Image: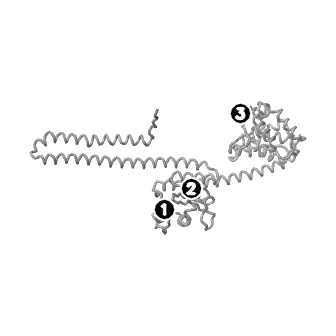
Amino acid sequence: MTETTPPSGAGRQREKLDLTAFTAYLLGAIVPLVALGAVVDRYVLPTLDDRLEAAGLIGLLISIALLSLGSFLVLRRSTHRSLRRMNADNERLAALLRSASALAESRDHQTVMERASAAALELSGADAAFVLLGSGSDALPIPACSAGERAAELYEAEGPGLAEILRLVLDQNRSVLRGADSAPLAPADGAPAAPEKSGGPAIALPIPGPKGTPGVLLALRARGAAAFDAGPLDALSTLAALSSVALHNADLVHAQRNFFAHVTELLSQALDNHLDYHRGHGKRVAQLAHLVGRELGMGEDAMHRLHFGALLHDIGMLKMDRAQKMNARSCERHAALGARMLAPIVLWQDVAPIVHSHHERWDGRGYPDGLAGDSIPLESRVIALADAYDSIASHSSYRVALGRAEAIQELRECTGTQFDPRVFAAFLAIAERGELGPEE
């Protein structure tokens, strides 16, 4: 049995266009022509005595019919070409919108450059695409990221011709469009052409790189390929602007995270000084929580929250008397105090609920809200186990340290009541692989 594939959206558009054009041709040309032929046959030809005159009139009618058919075929070809161009523009616009969304979600320079080069390859129909970033000196930028199976091959083959393109873009801060083989370089905005260089079609556009260093978005086709038209150039110009914004945003995210990390470190040191008997506890809990989170397959955002939540889980103790002993009441108070300290700060808003719930229990008998099971944030469940392990296995604690085997057994006995069984299973897998480090 033969299966038929339904026509695509573009195919259905062409079929509909053909039907419309044929209907218009039938009603606007064929019907009037047939009517004219009928009138001529009935009223004109009988009045002609000369057969030559009759034959000439018939020939004229046939010529009109052929010209009409030719006009229809030309119109059909023209409308199909316009439809193809419109479909290509629509597909390019859809790809540009997808790229804009992906770039907006990028949080680091490498991700921005990878997505920009991949988008440039898709938007231009090139054989290879590159993002090149400078060092702030007079040296030409070097490829920071590329897309396309032939990227390395084409970049090496182009050689001096590419250097000339890049220099033109950087010196004049203009887009450059190089046509087919051996065509001169022409600034895309109509400026005078650069000296002639042999090479395949290319588009190069300026983009400011991280911290303002100059950069270039480059699309290449192999020698002998068709030249780029205006559609890819316009799309890549928009992509270059979007990439510039994304790189700037990545700079801001990096600076924010750097500040976040340093301030957290300062608070962690202040907490160590405040709780002299518990020195280094936050860092050890964060290290163990990271191992458990990785074992559980937590995502990047969750791991980020887990790390800083673990470092700051006892931050509420800064608001309490350092001589106060740890008990159920102090656990309840310092968790809530810590969450209230962090919640007003935008950088720590996602961490505050984790700190608030790190003394909750799996069976619902914890503090401060009596949450149970999966209603407790996963990050809090991981920190709860890591906190308990360090407290019972570390000499830098408020109680006599247990050996590793005894500490693990104590956690095992509390699993299903105090601790999430899945979290303990991940911790146990880490311990059995010997990833907990040397025993104190």
Mark 1 vs 3, N-terminal side: 1
Query: Where is residue 335, by image quadrant?
Result: top right
Number of numbered markers: 3
Distance of label 2 from label 3 (alpha carbons): 51 Å
Amino acid type of the residue tagged 3 in the rendering: Ser
Distance of label 2 from label 1 (alpha carbons): 19 Å
Q: Residue at x 56, y 55 (%)?
A: 150
Mark 3: give few (<14), some (14-19) or many (20+) Cα within 10 Å: few
Marks 2, 1: nearer the viewer: 2
Amino acid type of the residue tagged 1 in the rendering: Arg
**Residue 114 spot, x, y in % from top left:** 60, 52
Q: Residue at x 52, y 48 (%)?
A: 95
**Residue 54 spot, x, y in % from top left:** 14, 46
Distance of label 1 from label 3 (alpha carbons): 60 Å
SS class of the residue under badge 1?
A: strand
SS class of the residue under badge 2?
A: loop
Q: Report the side of 209 relative to 190 (left or right).
A: right
SS class of the residue under badge 3?
A: helix
Front residue of this view, candidates 45 and 101: 45
Q: Report the side of 181 relative to 251 (left or right).
A: left
Mark 2 vs 1, N-terminal side: 2
- Would you name the residue on which mark 1 appears? 178
Mark 2: give few (<14), some (14-19) or many (20+) Cα within 10 Å: some
Front residue of this view, candidates 254 and 55: 55
- Would you name the residue on which mark 2 appears? 150
- Would you name the residue on which mark 3 appears? 375
Amino acid type of the residue tagged 2 in the rendering: Arg
**Residue 97 spot, x, y in % from top left:** 52, 47
User: Is 194 placed above or below 319 here?
Assistant: below
Badges 1 and 3: C-beta atoms under 8 Å apart?
Answer: no
Q: Residue at x 69, y 51 (%)?
A: 257
